[in-house]
Image (cartoon, rainbow, N blue to C red):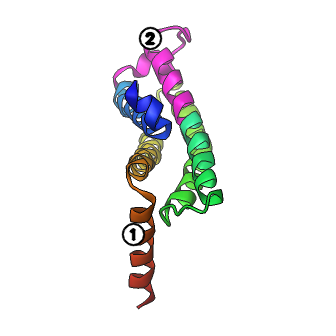
């Protein structure tokens, strides 16, 4: 609990990332429970629902965390804020992919392209979680130096 008191964004990134990782595995293993006509209170469905809720809350919280850092005149990584926006937009795409997989699963139609797109979206989300986790570790001066070195390298 020491981690939660010191840096809540770091704790939140870790928890939502772990839930997302196990959901990526569990949704394939428990496909019948998740996409079949089952109760919402079955353990795989409940775990998956909690995971999606944590991802949504983490994305929203991390955007506010970065805006707060910007308003306090602190630097953030140059790619973190656009990636946060992308992750929030991808939440809607993930929902569409899950709906399509569920629909096609019910009619026994192969949904390989939807699965691939869903895992790409989730991979981007995991990458974002790792970036935020790393940003919460770095000191503001380190982030500023890294951002400036990247800008200088691209100007040449």
- Name of the residue lying farthest toward the bottom: 156
Q: Nearer the viewer, residue 58 or 33?
A: 58
Kindly tell me whether residue 56 is visible in this rendering. Answer: yes
Q: Which residue, given by chain and number where applicable, does mark 1 sit on?
A: 146
Identify the residue shown where x is 47% and y is 27%.
108
What mark, if any, has residue 99 been given in the picture? none
Q: Which of marks 1 and 2 is nearer the N terminus?
A: 2
Identify the residue shown where x is 49% and y is 35%.
8
Is residue 34 part of the magenta span, yes or no? yes
Crowd band around label 2 with a 10 angstrom C-alpha radius: few (<14), some (14–19), many (20+): few
Identify the residue shown where x is 44% and y is 76%.
148
Q: Where is residue 109 in the image (x, y as percent from the top left)?
A: 47, 32
What residue span does the magenta drawing correspond to?
29-55
- Tell me the distance, in whole angstroms, between the alpha carbons under discs 1 and 2: 43 Å
Judged by its main secondary structure, the magenta piece is: helix
Q: Which residue, given by chain and number where applicable, does mark 2 sit on?
A: 43
On screen, residue 74 above or below 123: below
Tell me which corner region of the image, top left, top right, bottom left or bottom right, holds residue 22. Answer: top left
Q: Nearer the viewer, residue 142 or 33?
A: 142
On screen, residue 24 above or below 126: above
């Amino acid at each position: 609990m020491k981690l939660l008191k010191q840096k809540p964004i770091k704790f939140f990134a870790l928890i939502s990332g772990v839930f997302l990782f196990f959901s990526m595995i569990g949704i394939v293993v428990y496909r019948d429970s998740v996409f079949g006509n089952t109760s919402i209170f079955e353990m795989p469905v409940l775990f998956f629902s909690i995971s999606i809720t944590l991802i949504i809350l983490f994305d929203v919280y991390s955007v506010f965390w970065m805006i707060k850092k910007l308003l306090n005149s602190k630097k953030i990584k140059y790619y973190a804020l656009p990636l946060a926006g992308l992750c929030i937009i991808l939440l809607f795409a993930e929902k569409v992919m899950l709906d399509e997989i569920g629909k096609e699963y019910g009619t026994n139609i192969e949904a390989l392209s939807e699965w691939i797109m869903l895992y790409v979206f989730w991979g981007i989300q995991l990458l974002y979680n790792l970036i935020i986790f790393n940003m919460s570790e770095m000191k503001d001066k380190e982030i500023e130096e890294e951002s400036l070195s990247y800008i200088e390298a691209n100007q040449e």
